[in-house]
Amino acid sequence: MPLTNNVIIKLNEITTMVEDKSKLTESEVEEIKIIFRELVKKNERYDLDEIEFWFENEGSWKIKESRVRITNLANYVQDKYQQTAHLRIISDDDCGC
């Protein structure tokens, strides 16, 4: 699945936000999680291989560990959102008690 324009825009935001591409700070990691969380909440889907490929070809991400870390964060957020999206809270009116 190719990346959508919205996802590419967010990947560009990450690239602009991260100052040292060789090492992510904890605050950058948290910001990256927020970016991916916003994407999945808006039902934007992304392929992790495509994200890693995008960062690899973007040009400024020379260190593989940083690219892999971002891909892992994207995976973590997407998996977590999909797991919690399936949980539903039943209100008292719906249970028929």
Image (cartoon, rainbow, N blue to C red):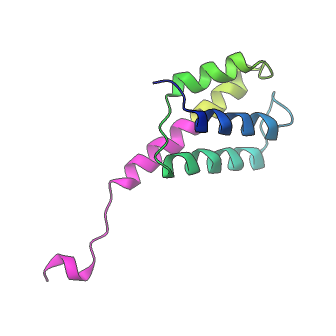
Q: Residue at x 56, y 49 (%)?
A: 37
The stretch of residues the image draws in magenta is: 73-97
Count of numbered circles in the view: 0
What's the magenta bit mostly, secondary-structure-wise? helix
5 in magenta: no
Q: Position of residue 25 (x, y in %)?
A: 79, 42
Instruction: State the quadrant of the N terminus.
Output: top left
* Depicted 37 relative to depicted 9: above or below: below
Q: Position of residue 55 (x, y in %)?
A: 68, 23
Residue extending furthest toward the front = 5
Q: Residue at x 53, y 22 (%)?
A: 49
Left or right? Give the position of 51 relative to 85.
right
Front one among 67 and 44:
44
Left or right? Give the position of 22 relative to 90.
right
Q: Position of residue 20 (x, y in %)?
A: 86, 33
* Depicted 96 relative to depicted 62: above or below: below
Q: Residue at x 69, y 50 (%)?
A: 30
80 in magenta: yes
Left or right? Give the position of 10 relative to 22.
left
